[in-house]
């Protein structure tokens, strides 16, 4: 407890993190590496706490395409079953001898109606079949309108195309030590007016109750004019730092987490973009420094940024 008392006296406590202070949480981390909060909402219905449009914009490309193709196949399969149940004799132009051929042609008629292609060699007859095909055409138009919005939203959504180093380092700094994290852009975007904040969260027990304590960490630089190469975010470990009394064993025995917040202006999108990540104490390398990740090309006229070296470091003594 003496360690945390010294921290409370010297360090600046941050109670505005959104995670609260009293908790029974004993999981792995508060913020995932991708920046999303390690929180699940319960107590309300599934449809109430899920924004399907936001979810479709944020899922991976693989999941997105799997959902789109699955929905496309299922809708056409449902309407093919309806046409087959009504009777394929109500679809002029179908020439089939086996039941499988009849169902297959009903399926592809559904595809043509759903996409409004309408090749014309098959057409519905009778009220029921015509009514079903008109409903399918309406569903197809609405579905493609929604899909177009999703495609545009995913394509045009502003993103912070930056990457953080996989590890945070406790490195030599001037006459002492510092916590260092490295960040770099990885797309052909122009990022200006970059701002970062770093918060330390520590879990401990006070009077038999689990407690979260958060501390705002002072940085060497909180803002830079442009992020063109890499930026090493530095928190000097001075007497005012909550890490001042920390040893290498403390990082192994105490459950804590650094939350990094990064915000910049992307002039290609003309919008501010945000990136978050976190480093648990087991992702801290004690006694190391980052290796250079940029160099000049062979003609010495262009700077090369080696993104594959973003997380490269070497061990040093403190």
Image (spheres, rainbow, N blue to C red):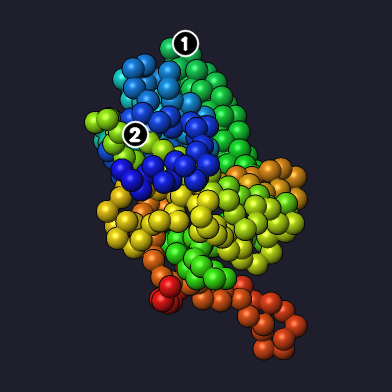
Residue at 49 percent across and 46 percent down: it is 10
- Is 150 situated above or below 162? above
Q: Is residue 74 left or right of residue 97?
A: right
Q: Is residue 313 left or right of residue 158?
A: left
What is the quadrant of residue 174 in the picture? bottom right
- Which of labels 2 and 1 is toward the front? 2
Q: Which residue is mark 1?
A: 127
Percent position (x, y) of residue 243?
44, 54
**The disc label shown at residue 217, or none:** none
Query: Which quarter shows the C terminus?
Result: bottom left
Label number found at residue 211 = 2
- Classify mark 2: helix, strand or loop: strand
Residue 231: horizontal and vertical position, in percent?
A: 61, 63
Closer to the N terminus: mark 2 or mark 1?
1
Report how far apart the C-alphas of labels 2 and 1 lie in the structure.
69 Å
Q: Relative to 176, is 315 on the left or the right?
A: left
Quarter the N terminus occupies: top left
The answer to whether residue 65 shows anywhere in this view is no
């Amino acid at each position: 407890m003496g360690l945390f008392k010294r921290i409370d006296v010297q360090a600046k406590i941050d109670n505005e993190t959104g995670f609260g202070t009293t908790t029974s949480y004993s999981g792995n981390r508060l913020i995932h590496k991708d920046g999303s909060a390690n929180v699940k909402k319960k107590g309300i219905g599934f449809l109430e706490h899920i924004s399907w449009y936001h979810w479709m914009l944020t899922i991976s490309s693989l999941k997105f395409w799997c959902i789109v193709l699955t929905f496309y196949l299922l809708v056409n399969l449902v309407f093919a079953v309806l046409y087959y149940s009504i009777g394929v004799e109500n679809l002029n132009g179908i020439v089939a001898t086996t039941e499988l051929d009849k169902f297959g042609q009903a399926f592809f008629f559904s595809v043509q109606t759903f996409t409004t292609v309408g090749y014309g060699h098959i057409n519905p007859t009778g009220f029921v079949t015509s009514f079903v095909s008109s409903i399918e055409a309406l569903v197809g138009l609405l579905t493609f309108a929604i899909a177009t919005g999703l495609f545009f939203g995913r394509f045009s959504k502003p993103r912070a195309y930056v990457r953080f180093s996989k590890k945070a380092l406790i490195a030599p700094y001037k006459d002492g030590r510092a916590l260092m994290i490295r960040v770099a852009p990885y797309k052909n975007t122009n990022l200006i007016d970059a701002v970062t904040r770093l918060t330390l969260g520590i879990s401990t027990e006070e009077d038999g109750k689990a407690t979260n304590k958060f501390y705002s960490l002072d940085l060497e630089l909180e803002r830079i004019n442009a992020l063109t190469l890499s930026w090493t975010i530095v928190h000097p470990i001075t007497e005012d730092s909550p890490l001042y009394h920390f040893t290498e064993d403390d990082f192994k025995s105490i459950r804590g987490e650094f939350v990094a917040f990064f915000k910049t202006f992307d002039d290609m999108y003309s919008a501010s973009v945000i990136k978050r990540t976190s480093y648990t104490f087991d992702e801290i390398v004690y006694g190391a420094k980052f290796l250079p990740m940029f160099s000049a090309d062979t003609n010495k006229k262009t700077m090369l940024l080696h993104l594959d070296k973003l997380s490269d470091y070497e061990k040093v003594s403190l």
